[in-house]
Amino acid sequence: VHNLHAWLFSGITTIYDLGGAAEITKPLQEGVRDNTIYGPDIYFTAAPITVKGSHPIPALKELNPWPARSFITSNLNIIKKPEDAKKIIEGLVDQNVDYIKLICDELPPGSPFMAEELMKPLIEEAHNQGLKVLVHIGSVENALAAARAGADVLAHAVYRDKLSNADVKFLKEKGVKMIFTISGFENID
């Protein structure tokens, strides 16, 4: 709540939680909406959807000691096959999320990333439920695959390589937006 006050008094009127715990964020969102908490408007997703061994699993395992790492990684939504999409999205809808977040990034380099064939049914099911989908990407390949699968927004921008003019034109034609997380990239050369 202290951070919400600080953000609002710093001029931040809207925040997007791109992958937290719905059971923590939802009560804050409701408090802001019913004016019992002063803060910016909050929109959130629960834990992101990823594939086995993909981001954020390696980072969570590296940054958290056992047994915490087991608990944290067990709460992630992991898709194994296209048929899992409906159940995963329905579970997130039950948590009253505002949107869905997928992970399609090789972080760390060489790790698995979500294939277009898995993104597409997740995005279709989310759209059927009236939810937009943000996809965490890292490379041009990730960005283009997410756009072809129907993503609404690309999160954190391409940082592994550079978009060509043709890539930008394709993303624009698809109507895909891109948002940046400046604090996450302050130290990238």
Image (cartoon, helix red, strand yellow):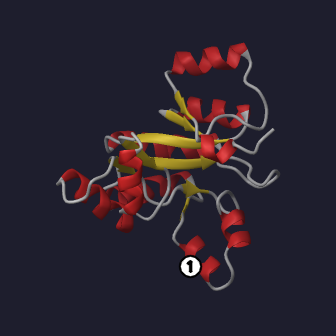
Q: Position of residue 137 (x, y in %)?
A: 64, 41
Does residue 114 appear left or right of residue 42 in this picture?
right
Neighbour class for label 1 at 10 Å: few (<14), some, many (≥20)? few
From the viewer's side, name the closer residue of 135 and 38.
Answer: 38
Q: Compared to 27, does 105 lie above or below?
A: above
Residue 128 lies, with reference to residue 88, above or below; the image says above
Left or right, 67 with reference to 151: right
Mark 1 lies on residue: 71
Q: Position of residue 172 (x, y in %)?
A: 55, 17
Secondary element at image label 1: helix
Residue 98 in percent (x, y) is at 35, 48
Q: Amino acid at mark 1?
A: Phe
- Residue 186: name its quadrant: top right
- The single residue placed furthest to the bottom in the displayed view is 67
Q: Quadrant of the N terminus?
A: bottom left
Residue occupying the point 42% across, 58% down? 3
Residue 99 visible in this rendered orientation of the protein: no
Image location (x, y in percent) of residue 27 = 28, 64
Residue sitting at x 44%, y 65%: 21
